[in-house]
Amino acid sequence: MGWFLLRRRREPSYRFAQRPARIGLIRGLLGTVFLLSAVVLVLGALSVYQYVQLSADRPVARVDVAADGPQQFRVSLTTPEGRTQEFVIAGDQWQLEARVIRWRVPVALAGVPPIYRLDRLTGRYADIEKERTATRTVHALDGWTLPDLWSLQRQFPQWLPFVDADYGSATFLPMLDGGVYQVSINPRGGLVATPADEATKARLQRTGW
């Protein structure tokens, strides 16, 4: 009987000693969750920074083309910020692609415009058979190596339910030696390519474009 009473007296102190350990464990888990959430938010913010808001039609690139051989061209792409990249493109047409992120409710109802980022510059062949068998050229236009908002949403849609990353846009025109083109994007995220000077416009019209 005495042993039983002694054990009953010791139990509360034993349980009390366990409480700080449990509280510490819970605090550690919560701290880890908050830290991971902060990392995700920072990566998301950096990812959004890589994109450009679309509140009106805006130019996204100037494309200059020079022949470099049969169905081979040197294509220079210049952004409005003045950054120029030069690529060798095989084919008859150049194609510019962009990733566009649009927002779902309630973000869309708040009037937040879509955002975009140029993604690829590729070559196309007018002949379908060559498109299947001839040399293909594809060039990435961004140097962002970390997962961006687009890829994060597609891999973990439950994390970003307000992001619509299932939309891309592309535009293309024939590659003419000496041709100059302007590429714009509208608020809905659609890329549009047009000749940038009268000479290119006239040559495109003569070829049926």
Image (cartoon, rainbow, N blue to C red):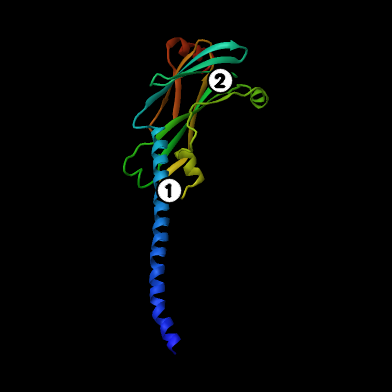
How would you rate the neighbour count of disc 1 (Cα within 10 Å): few for under 14, some for 14-19, many for 20 or more? few
Mark number displayed over residue 93: 2
Residue 118 spot, x, y in % from top left = 46, 28
Q: Residue 179 carries which label?
A: none
Q: Residue 36 carries which label?
A: 1
Looking at the image, residue 189 lies above or below residue 65: below
Residue at (44% x, 35% y) in the render: 100
Furthest-left residue in this view:
110
Dot 2: few (<14), some (14–19), or many (≥20) neighbours within 10 Å? some
Q: Residue furthest bottom?
A: 1
Q: What percent of the width, then of the height, locates residue 120?
A: 51, 27
Q: Is residue 7 above or below residue 88?
A: below
User: Quadrant location of residue 103?
Assistant: top left
Tell which tag, 2 or 1, sits nearer the viewer.
1
Left-right relation of 14 to 72: left
Spatial CA distance of label 2 from label 1 is 45 Å
* Residue 195 in picture, x, y percent from top left: 45, 16
Identify the secondary structure beneath mark 1: helix
Does 80 sit left or right of 90 as displayed?
left
The type of residue carrying mark 1 is Leu
Q: What residue type is labelled 2?
A: Gln
Question: Is tag 2's residue or tag 1's residue first in the polypeptide sequence?
Answer: 1
How far across and down, in percent of the image, does residue 141 sit? 49, 26
* Image quadrant where residue 88 sits: top right
In the structure shown, which secondary structural element does the residue marked by tag 2 occupy? strand
Res 189 seen here: no
Name the one closer to the observer, 78 or 177.
78
Rendered-image quadrant of the N terminus: bottom left
The one nearer the camera, 23 or 135, is 23
